[in-house]
Amino acid sequence: ILSAPPSARLSTPATEITTLPNGVRVGSMETPSPVSAVGVLLDFGSRHERLRNALPDDSAVSTAGVNHLLELLAFQSSLPSASLSSTRLRSRLDNLGAATFANSSREQMMYCVDVLRPNAVPAFDLLAEVVKCPEVAEEEVEEMKKVMEFQLMDVVPQILLGEGLQMAAYGKLAESNGDGDGDGDDDTLQQLGRPHFCTAEALPFLSARSVHFFKEQNLLHNPHGVVVSGSGIEHDALVELAMRHFGDMTAANPNEPPPSPPPHDNPHTLPSTYTGGQYRLPTPLHSLYPDKPQYTHVALAFEAPLGWHSPHLVPLCVLQTLLGGGSSFSAGGPGKGMYSKLYREVLNRYSWVESAEAFSSFHAESGLWGISGSCRPDKAGELTKAMVREFVELSRYYVTEEELQRAKNMLKCNVLTQLESRLVLFEDIGRQILTYGRREDAESMCGKIDAVTKEDIIEVVRMAIGTMRPTMGVVGVDISKVPMIEDVEKMLSAESMGTHSVGGSGGGGRGGGKVEKKSWFS
């Protein structure tokens, strides 16, 4: 019975991909599950929004915040083509036993239905109508704007910090990076530096017209930007559904050649340039909970050039897992990352640290990776110095083989465990096809993770510290103790040169061995 592992006796399901004549792509993987996850991923996001879009009749419409609004409107708007009110639509989906999901990001939009396999066809029929032709009446928009207004009243600091990091990392350029129409709007605001969530300033200008204009511009005439994805469904059946609902889509200019391959399928995608910089936002005391403990939140990040298409993508993912981290309270136990670098050297060392965690965010042409943390306001300066020491130590000392192997094993375990979920599998298929035009299987990905060496890790960190300006974000009631970015740059430079202006490197006893300084430090 135990003579061979299950993989030797079972066939491995494969991802099947079909491209329809009009350019719409269909990807799926069959599973033994009695439930199917089907949906659509679209090649547009908040980076394609603009505060002012000139129209032929000399009027203008704002699309800033539209993706946030679309996420809330999903499965909540009437379907005239199916003679369904929003109430009847939700009732129909409930009768099918369907769970619906919608998610927007800076570059992609996702609609998904998780439903019993026998009901996958009628559920997808409704989903396709939701994507292509919802009514989006003005009263529906106004109702969702009230929801957005309530959300804006209590935005958590972590979201403010994430938005601020993007704004600082991809700051305004002196020259126009917009459409060049000279209309005096947000042309100098880079796409990756635009807010993802709707702001209080943009909210009043959102309307049903904003939604229809944005979808007309980015969806209805862009079949190459549509991926129909599914897990737990036969591929031929999904292709038939995609052909029925999306096979009639045509490009805005049918005579033009197909768009360039990823990363820039959407003709409205304009590459953003990393600038680095800082974002500092003092926040008021919480009006409802004035006695609640107040923390200062700090993030320090560097660019990941080429983003999803970077040759350093996998080493960066291993590095993020190696750094690990989390909050000061954890249930612990195997697999919880309690032996990760940030837990050992920051969270367990300094009792005043509330959280410390590695993060990354990738986009088509660029990305960010770094460390974020929170603590009492009076200790925020020391937390910043601790972050600097972590970066510098990684650039001066090899990580140990034990650390590296642990991080690689944890990353592989996380990837494989996540892919056991049909919803994650559905999303992974769709996003990979939309980003790369293909899907890499788990075996190949694990092979790349295994191939990462300690030299790869130190190269990534050296390249960041030695060649680019950092990005820093600070949010909190009291941010006065956090040094300015110019001071952080001096700390990084002094520490890299071994002058230890912000404390010891913390690496004297490490088993990885010190690395000789290279010319990139100077």
Image (cartoon, rainbow, N blue to C red):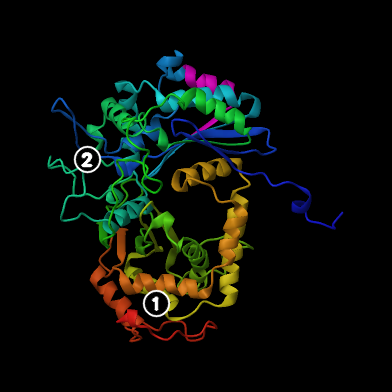
Amino acid on which disc 2 is placed: Glu
Range of residues picked out in magenta: 88-101
Left or right of 182 on screen, residue 203? right
Left or right of 23 on screen, residue 425? right
Tell which tag, 1 or 2, sits nearer the viewer: 1
* Residue 75, percent from left and from top: 45, 27
Q: Quadrant of the N terminus?
A: bottom right
Return the residue nearer the eye: 504 or 123: 123
* Residue 255, percent from left and from top: 33, 31
Dot 1 surroundings within 10 Å: few (below 14), some, or many (20 or more)?
many
Amino acid on which disc 1 is placed: Val
Return the residue nearer the eye: 12 or 410: 12
Q: Quadrant of the C terminus?
A: bottom left
Q: Image height check: is 425 above or below 314?
A: above
Q: Image height check: is 365 above or below 239?
A: below
Q: Is residue 273 visible?
A: yes
Residue on which disc 2 sits: 201
* Residue pictured at 17% horizontal, 50% vertical: 176
* Residue pictured at 34% horizontal, 44% vertical: 154
- Indicate which disc residue 366 carries: none
CA gap, disc 1 to disc 2? 40 Å
Residue on which disc 1 sits: 392
